[in-house]
Amino acid sequence: MFDLSPLMMARRPHIPITPIDAEPQSAERRSFLKIMAASMALAAGGCGGPPREPILPYVQMPEMLVPGRPLYYATAFMHRGYAQGVLVESNMGRPTKVEGNPHHPASLGASGVFAQASVLQLWDPDRSQTVRQGTALSTWDAFKTKLLERRKAWQSDGGAGLRILTGTVSSPTLAAQIAALLRRYPKARWHCHDPLHDDAGYEAARLAFGKPADLLYRFDRAAIVLSLDADPFSDWPGGIRYARDFVRGRRSSAAQFDKRLYTLEASPGLLGAMADNRIALPPHDIERTVWRVAARLGMAGLPQVPPASDARAGKWEEVLADRLTRHRGASLIVAGGSLSPQTRALVHLMNAHLGNFGKTIMPIAPVEASPQNHAESIATLAEDMHAGAVSSLVMLDTNPVYDAPADIGFEQALRKLPFSVHLGLYRDETARVSTWHLPQAHGYEQWSDGRAFDGSASIVQPVIAPLYGGRSAHELLDLLSGEGERSAYALVRGFWQARSGARDLDAFWEAALRKGVIEGSESTVLTLHPARSVPPPAFDGPALRALFAPDASVGGGEYANNAWLQELPRPFSTLTWDNAAVISENTARSLRLQTGDVVRLSLADRADATIDAPVWVWAGHADGAVTLHLGYGRRAAGHVGNGVGFDAYRLKTLRGPHALKLEKTVRQIAFATTQNHQRMEGRDIVRMATLEEFRRNPHFANDEPRERTPEISLYAEWQYKDYKWGMAIDQNACIGCRACTIACQAENNIPVVGREEVRRGREMHWIRVDRYDIGPATHVRSAFQPVPCMHCETAPCEEVCPVGATVHDSEGLNVQVYNRCVGTRFCSNNCPYKVRRFNFLKYAETSLDRPAPAYNPEVTVRRRGVMEKCNYCLQRVTRARIEAEKLGRRVQDGEVVTACQAACPTEAIVFGDLNDPGSKVNRAKASPLDYALLAELNTRPRTTYAAVVLNPDEELG
């Protein structure tokens, strides 16, 4: 690998070297000690002894490595225990960018926001960098010595007091290691804890089929989809694949739009935003509706259920039952985590009754190695700890002190243990309470394996040597077992040597690494026998119920110290650097609240825990519910995430539903948002029509009357004889996930500006995703519109720049010449699309921005006083042109893929050469739905949009 010490020192990383509660010192002394500690740690990282696997010395250049040309490594990004296939871009040994692996079933070449931001987490200087015993610095050798004493005790008593705590585990090698450890110490126990784990999903499968199962949904085969407070596009293990499948048949190129989506949800989600018909109901009303629809389908043995409190639900019951009956075998019902296990089990029986299993639903054995109820598991562990039955606890990459159920007293129990070990990327809340903390290797620094949502296995291979001396969970478990001190590479390869049955292990291994997925490893479809009936839930709900949800940017808190994600606008609120208590307009009106008011929240049956939270009033949210996004209020996340937002886990207890008490305070806060108005006010920014209107007039998108439509320009027409680049964005396919925004940030060295600068309107993202509310609040629909630079033919920005810093190049790109820019900002004032970003300060030099090794070397890092904007990833265009010229040909369609285009889960963005008649971008622009934004200004943008076509059920309005 490569010695990165000189590069890292140029960044002056923040290295915490004292306990969080240590006495403060002078600022000068603290800065000096930080720099000295960084020097020592990084020098040690560069001289960590010979690697345990064969590598090639850089004295002789490694094969295929060409200076200035990146290499790509197929590996897997592990998110909440599940694998997503990715390609990690490495520039001279430095990982700088992540792309989706087109061969992997969970990514199909696309990626999500967490995968894109994972490279920043790799380079985070706040990561744990040393072994600690309590608050004191220690070493791996000291830990091994202490562990040896413990192993002797475990061998004598069979591991009676030993407990292993993990998150969701899909790694076949890790599961085999844990199983071997439990055989060695038969009295030890394995517990699982993921605060976002879908416990109700496994319980529903047990009720419906007698055993746990995972369900694979085939959205591409379903003519009718009914979503019941489910959001499979956001944070489900197969979210990218589901989004890609769903938009088939809804694209502008398909021009059919005959599929239909019905959504009943409490809090707006990405799938609900795509709905043709949507209604907002609290969870208990959704449950009532589901049971009454099941009765209308003719299912026997169902109890009498009271109607929903919303009068519109009665009509929905009638229509849904009719439409589902008409589409037997071609329908799909998906239920979300806010519904009870009983209702979700009923949904399984409804799908079976409609003949959907084997057609739109494929059941498989659980991908998770230990399919258990995580909340019950950690509650049992805490109970044993309180009772003194646990003497040794080993925690692998989990943070229960922060995110365990609030009523089990996990932190108090952990403090009682004589021996507790925490392996993690950060010295987080749990690490600070444990007797030992061990630094963990990042996923791009270690060998491992993992399974995707459909069971497909991938080998996780390192792209760089561990920056801070971290080790993997495989290596720690090997130490626990006393088998020796084998490397993770040896452990993973040894497992697959025994499992694969390949005659040529080297060929099998190389193929798995090259492709990023092991052929034929996907799970087989099960044949399940549904139960005749399931017990009903309690159909009454509290007057005000808390709905806990992962945050779209920081998840459950594991990404709280990632500045890219903190500053990424949330899909519906465009909120950054904060979370909020989200309520409906009716609820806000009844409680006399408005956005920004701070309220005090507590559980109705547990008044000892309270949190103060700012309110966000959200059109389309259900009445009688409060959505609380998790992952904030961190105390030991790092210098980026500490103290951001409020900690909703303090109200999340073991059992639900969670009835809330709300008290208004006198305080208010000003949120940092990137869009302060969500209505189009009669303008045709996002053009939309129903399917019937589209069939009557396919050209509706360009038939809108305008005040003026100039046909001529004062400037002579310029002919682009070589290349002419352009982009088309299909708003029918955009789900608003903002993967494009963060992919652009990673690719183009876009800095983070911080909360206060966002509040001043100084965010730097080159592509934003605007959201607009359409329709009345009772059944509001969201429309998303990605807005990069339009690359106008008659660009108004160019005419006002006094120094010619923004000009057209020979291929029609509107480029920004940074060395010419003097910062007048005339161009930004004259841009009607507001897509230009100005460096008011030295944003690239703040502690929030990425360290120097993480920069893309092909993109200039801009200085203060310079304007910047989207340039269609000019560096990628140039690279493709150079390679094509070497071969003596033109750039072929698809050889230039912009960062936003590559990341998009639904392929909503298409880029290419407008001089190529057969290019995908020309085919997209040939659609009758294609239109130019603000065309009446005669800017003639190269970026155009496909108008939205909905297929609403007219009987539901």
Image (cartoon, rainbow, N blue to C red):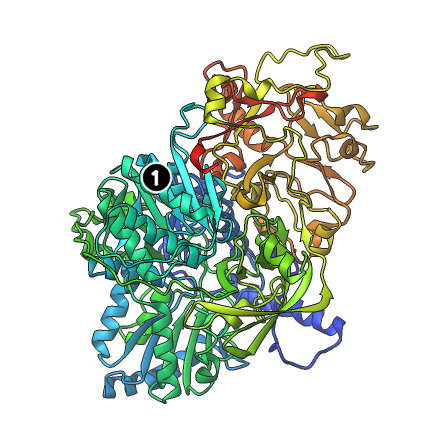
The vertical placement of 145 against 875, above or below, is: below
Residue drawn at the location 63% of the way across and 80% of the way down? 21
Q: Nearer the viewer, residue 857 or 914?
A: 914
- SS state under label 1: helix
Q: Classify 10 Å Cα crowding around label 1: few (below 14), some (14-19), many (20 and above).
A: many
- Say what amino acid the circle numbered 1 marks: Phe
Picture coordinates of residue 366, whole percent (x, y): 26, 57
Give the quarter of the image for residue 306: bottom left
Q: Nearer the viewer, residue 775 or 557?
A: 775
Q: Is residue 189 left or right of residue 698?
A: left
Picture coordinates of residue 17, whole percent (x, y): 60, 73
The vertical placement of 774 against 442, above or below, is: above
Q: Nearer the viewer, residue 226 or 488?
A: 226
Q: Nearer the viewer, residue 599 or 955?
A: 955
Picture coordinates of residue 339, whole percent (x, y): 39, 58
Say whether residue 427 is visible.
no
Q: Is residue 137 left or right of residue 365?
A: right
Give the quarter of the image for residue 848: bottom right
Picture coordinates of residue 399, whole percent (x, y): 46, 70
Q: Which residue is mark 1?
A: 219
Q: Is residue 682 left or right of residue 853?
A: right
Residue drawn at the location 44% of the way across and 88% of the way down? 416
